[in-house]
Amino acid sequence: MKTKKQKNIIQWLLKPLMVVTLFFNLASCVEQVDKSKSGTDAATDTSEKIESAIDLTGMKIGYCTPSLNAPYYQALLQSIQASTEKNGMVFLSADGQDDINKQIAAVEDLITKGVDALLLNPKDPDALVGVTKLAKAAGIPVFIIDSSIDPSADFVTTIQSNNLANGELAGEWLAKKFGKEKMNIALLSGNAGNPVGRTRKQGLLQGITEEQLRTLGYIDLDIKTQMYTDWSYAGGLKAMEDILVAHPDINVVITESDVCVLGAIKAIAQAGKTDDILIVAGADGQKEAIKYIMDTDFYGCTAMNSPVQIGKNAVEYAIQYINGKRDFKKTSFTAPLLITKENAAKYYDPKALF
């Protein structure tokens, strides 16, 4: 790592490059989080002090989220905040406000504030590459969390759930559930080109086909349609309404995320088809989805994508880096886990943000 003096010199040189962009963005885009305002979710209040040979007091961890418009993003932010402050460090938060240009500017501002480690959840895998290079030039290690970034970026590691393995578990469960029965499948995705969604979808389809080959000796995979939901309740509702009109024979909905399908449930219920359609999610373990799994038969399973664990791991890796560790794998996964009716109660927390 560079000395503080070297970092200050580099940051001073970078400021002219950043000032024009920052001028046109809201001053509130980046702020130090005030605990009295943000609170702490019960699900994140499990952080532990991480062993460190270096005094961490006063060191700054910066986190930039693509948005705070979903419970997952809020829970992830709170987990990072709790873990950071538990270890005596200062937490700086930046909200990209669901806008790539604002997220770039927010990250640049974190760099000028001299954070000791930058945790970045990029809205776009390509657009944020440049700011990772600015961070490296300033001597700031970058950790990509939850989502993915282009390999040309300068970053230490990516911390996320095992999207491929989780999807495979959900796909296998579905194939076992249906056996030889015909599946007419609708696929609900987040948005086009999203690398995390693509990996979850790949896992779902691999899980279905591999299990069919093992048990049936052939593949019968009929995806009637794919619709995009923009990772939102409203998007899922609209997509499902359109699907039910165009494909009334649908009996399975597979999805890249619980949030993509929670709105779809309303459309399914309004059409009187909760007894005719089975839902399977490749992620996330959102509390509303777990509750449906516990209480109904139409939501079959989901897979765990824990924002609490990802946040804790990200802070732990940042502290390890500060202490001199450099041999990180390029991707670090949390353990895959399938949630079904048999184990849903174990993972349901009605007080959780997510």
Image (tube, rainbow, N blue to C red):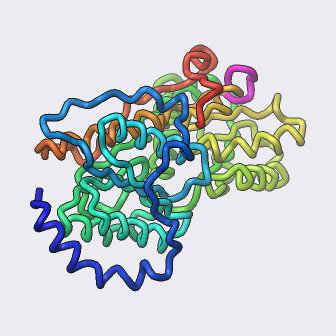
Q: Examine the rendered structure and indicate whether residue 301 appears above or below residue 240.
A: above
Identify which residue is drawn at 63% across, 28% down. Answer: 351
Residue at 37% x, 33% y is: 334
Residue 190 belongs to the span the image colors magenta: no
Relative to 333, 78 lies left or right: right
- Seen from the viewer's position, the closer of residues 324 and 169 is 324
Image quarter where the N terminus lies is bottom left
Q: Which of 102 and 303 is in front in this view?
A: 102
Residue 127 left/right relative to 315:
right
Instruction: Tell me if residue 274 can be seen.
Output: yes
Q: How many marks?
A: 0
Residues 121 and 9: in front is: 9
- In the displayed structure, would residue 147 be above or below residue 125? above
- Region in magenta: 293-299
- The image position of residue 166, as x and y in percent, is 46, 34
- Residue 179 seen from this side: no
Asked whether 295 falls inside the magenta stretch, the response is yes
Q: Does 83 appear above or below 99? A: above
Q: Which residue lies furthest to the top in this view?
A: 342
Q: Residue at x 44, y 41 (%)?
A: 163
The location of residue 263, given as percent across then percent down, is 74, 45
x and y, in percent, of residue 194 in the image: 49, 58
Q: In which quarter of the image is residue 128?
A: bottom left
